[in-house]
Amino acid sequence: MRSVISLILFAFLLTSCGSSTSESISLLEGYWSIEEVILADGSEREFPFTNHLDHFEINGSKGVKSRVSPTYDGSMINYGSPVPFQWKEMGDSLLLIFKEGEQAYQQTIKKVDANTLVLLHENGTEYTYQKFEMDEE
């Protein structure tokens, strides 16, 4: 009987962990406006207003990050090329791994919810974003 209960508990824990990762990844999708950057030396850089957004799209274990800007008609203009990435769970961390030529780097998702995204770059820089919602008029 104990082994059955242990097996059920293990299965529950396993599915609970998986759902939090998939929930975190699904929360990442969308448009994000950068609010603040804290450099590795602790200095801060605030962004009281910016018209540039980061747009994340997820497809399975891969994704694309694009730099965009909203227009008056509600569409988005892309700046530069979209940057592909893979996401990977490593221990308790959720990593975004960007492999773009010599610009390869990774970021750790420190926090993601419906309104806030915090990414920690491998160089120690922390980026705080707020969810961007288009005005529907």
Image (tube, grey):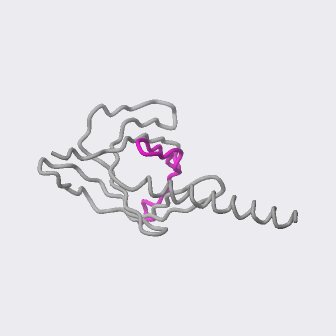
Q: Quadrant of the N terminus?
A: bottom right
Image point (81%, 62%), residue name:
6
Image point (28%, 45%), residue name:
133
In the image, 54: left or right of 90? left
* Residue 109 sits above or below residue 14 on the image: above
In the image, 4: left or right of 44? right
- Which percent across, then down, holds residue 131? 36, 44
- Magenta highlight range: 99-123
Q: Quadrant of the C terminus?
A: top left
- Which percent across, then down, holds residue 62? 45, 67
In the image, 3: left or right of 11? right
Is 42 magenta? The answer is no
* Residue 41 sits above or below residue 112 on the image: above
* Residue 24 sits above or below residue 46 on the image: below
Is 101 magenta? The answer is yes
User: Farthest left residue?
Assistant: 73
- Which percent across, then down, holds residue 135? 21, 44
- Which percent across, then down, holds residue 120? 51, 45
